[in-house]
Image (cartoon, rainbow, N blue to C red):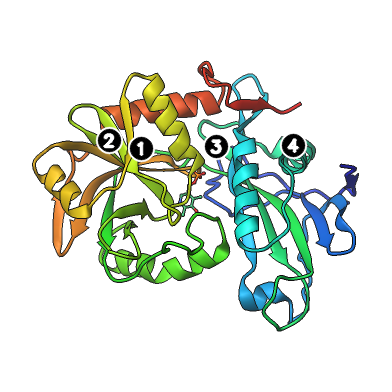
Amino acid sequence: MEIKIERAKTLKPKPAANTELGFGRYYTDHMFVLDWDKDQGWHDARIVPFAPIPLDPATMVLHYAQETFEGLKAYRTKDGRILLFRPEMNARRFANSNRRLCMPELSEEMFVEAIEALVSVEQDWVPAEEGTSLYIRPFMFATEAAVGVHPASSYKFVIILSPVGAYYPEGVNPVKIYVEDEYVRATKGGTGFTKCGGNYAASIAAQVKAEQLGYTQVLWLDGVHQRYIEEVGAMNMMFVYEDRRIVTPVLNGSILPGITRDSVLKLGKHLGYETEEARMDIHDVIADIKAGRVTEAFGTGTAAVVSPVNKIRFQGEEIGIGDGGIGHITQQLYDVLTGIQFGKTEDPMGWVVHLK
Ligand SMILES: *Cc1c(COP(=O)(O)O)cnc(C)c1O
């Protein structure tokens, strides 16, 4: 793919080393843009100054939400190199999302090449402080201006970058979660397995409700029986049993196949734990927590890597998990996975991609 580069005339000041980066507060100087239409297919790959995208008020994405996205990070090693973590998995998931939403597919090679080209132009933006990284947000949306429901005839694929802070500046912090038994996030046959904006729009009401009740995240149950555990917020959910088994809900079409989820399952096995994907009835899991058979619980996702859960509220009752702190196995998985991502420990699975 030939990528034209138009450099920004003035560069933004980079946040100082001691700035609280947060998440999604700062954006870099450039973005990647690629257009698609029926006649030309993908064309006009370019890296241009970061700027607003003007849209006709009839642009289809604003009305029918034909939009998909991805999320991954670039990590700086102690000796200054830049690493990506399993970007080909994001490429594959993006293609699956686009297929489901009748949007054009981008090849794995083009997706990864676009990310590498943009991160390479913006390499000075990859922060170096402990735990910080450069968040990469690729997305695609329908650009045809027509208020009629059909697959759009034109799309834009864009990548933006944001330096982000350590998710846990004061050490990994356990959260309280709320089992949602009214709203559902996704159902069988729907778009739960895709990363599309519409899934998030539908999830906000439950998130607001959980926060009002004093909880950090929503534990989602399945949309058919409202009985089987699916995800926690925008993370996959894992439980550790007293026999050192790591168990997560089996992918069923409405659960998002997280790359962190897949990595934790593979790494868990590599570290000698038994891992299992199963249909998990919330009633059984609650009983197992009460009986002490579940000793640790955590969410997994690119932003936090692992997010330990120490309290769970179900049908008006709050139940503690483990001793209230981060569990040993959760901590070990966090340390080994972030060690691989930041190039601190060896990479037994060959997951890391070095930026040239
Ligand atoms: C992105 C996402 C995840 C986590 O996926 P990772 O690839 O691990 O970052 C989990 N659930 C939902 C709903 C998501 O959108």
Q: Which residue is mark 1?
A: 172
- Mark 4 vs 2, N-terminal side: 4
Amino acid type at circle 4 is: Glu
Asked if marks 2 and 1 touch (Cβ < 8 Å), the reply is yes
Disc 2 residue crowd, few under 14, some 14–19, many 20+, Cα 10 Å: many
Q: Disc 1 to disc 4, how far (Cα)? A: 30 Å
Task: Identify residue type, mark 2.
Answer: Ile
Of circles 4 and 2, the one toward us is 4
Q: Which mark is residue 116?
A: 4
Instruction: For label 4, count other residues whose C-alpha is less than 10 Å away and answer few (under 14), some (14-19) or many (20+).
Output: many
Task: Kindly identify the amino acid type of the residue bearing the numbered disc 3.
Answer: Thr
**Cα–Cα gap, marks 4 and 3:** 19 Å
| Percent x, y of residue 202 | 46, 70
Q: Callout 2: helix, strand or loop?
A: loop
The answer to whether residue 8 shows anywhere in this view is: no
- Name the residue that disc number 2 marks: 326
Extreme residue toward the front, this view = 189
Upstream in sequence: badge 4 or badge 3: 4
Q: Of all residues shown, which one is farthest toward the left?
A: 291
Amino acid found under the numbered disc labelled 1: Val
Classify mark 3: helix, strand or loop. Answer: loop
